[in-house]
Amino acid sequence: MSTLVCRDINKSYKDKEVLKGVNLTIESGKIYGLIGRNGVGKTTLLSIMTAQNPANSGSVEFDGMKVWENREALDHLCFSREINTVSTLGQNTMKVKDYFKIASVYYPKWDNNMANKLIEQFGISPKKRVNKMSKGMLSMITIAIGLASKADITILDEPVAGLDVVAREDFYRMLIEEQQATGRTFIISTHIIEEAANVFEEVIFLHNGKVLLKENTAELLDRAKHIAGLNDEVDKVCQGIKTYHEENMGRSKSVTVLLEEGQKLGDSNDVTVQPVSLQNLFVALCGREG
């Protein structure tokens, strides 16, 4: 059972503290969803986890091996991220096949047949230059590289950006099929939460530079409730329970709660209790900074 462990990761850019003592353990054989607001440090954390960016302090280990400048550990990791169409030298005129050639050298388990099959399925020529591609096409190349890397732990940063709903559904299906066939671990960072919720076995909420929660998705949503009714009745039902995202409507209000072990809502026939979607739970817990 391979694990990737972050211990007390801190990262700052000039005067901005982005990550604040992040501790996180990624177990093998799961699909994780990494969710956070823009600028919260998701990409920074993922790049540190794969030794593409140094932390100011803390460490990352794969199966007990430090990943920084360690080829043996990095051979098991893949971070496939958005391809830039402009480089320091101007337009990025590299072809798809050039990226695949580089990947075949970098990833020891690289599956070139799978890579070519995927871009054929996506309708992209290996000779296509990346500076001539749409955002959706670039996302497809990112997905092809991540899946074909065959890395034990594969990270995809906003892989469905620019894809239409049909292409996104195709991606989720391919992701599940690959994970089930190989037992690989995937970490998916995305802003499109709701349609991916059923794909994520576990979710990680990153908020204010820290891991707010890391939990089995189904179990998390089972604990989350949306309660609405008259102010006094809602207060009675939620007595002793922390509430989030209170919305007031005259004499009525609604709140979201995340029940802890042993906690139960109070009794009342004058409130409605409904399940909460993953997206709405994220908004309730992380919708406001601070």
Image (tube, rainbow, N blue to C red):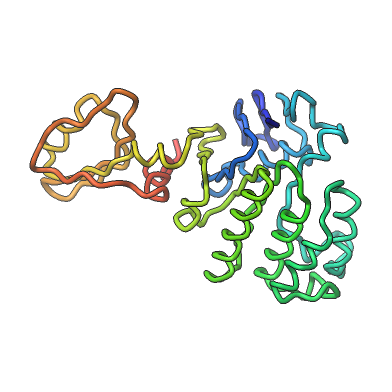
Q: Position of residue 77 (x, y in %)?
A: 76, 41
Q: Is residue 17 left or right of residue 97?
A: left
Q: Is residue 240 left or right of residue 71?
A: left
The answer to whether 91 is drawn above or below residue 212 in the figure is below
Q: Quadrant of the C terminus?
A: top left
Q: Position of residue 152 (x, y in %)?
A: 73, 42
Q: Residue at x 70, y 36 (%)?
A: 14
The answer to whether 64 is drawn above or below residue 204 in the figure is above
Pick whichever, 201 or 286, lies toward us: 201
Q: Position of residue 99 (x, y in %)?
A: 85, 61
Could you say which quadrant of the image residue 270 lies in? top left
Pick whichever, 262 or 96, lies toward us: 262
The answer to whether 169 is drawn above or below residue 65 in the figure is below
Residue at the left extreme? 269
Q: Position of residue 191 (x, y in %)?
A: 53, 54
Q: Residue at x 29, y 34 (%)?
A: 243
Q: Is residue 230 left or right of residue 93?
A: left
Pick whichever, 246 or 15, lies toward us: 246
Q: Residue at x 49, y 33 (%)?
A: 212
Q: How many marks?
A: 0
Q: Is residue 231 left or right of residue 179?
A: left
Pick whichever, 222 or 70, lies toward us: 222
Q: Residue at x 24, y 47 (%)?
A: 274
Could you say which quadrant of the image residue 84 lies in? bottom right
Could you say which quadrant of the image residue 112 lies in? bottom right
Q: Quadrant of the N terminus?
A: top right
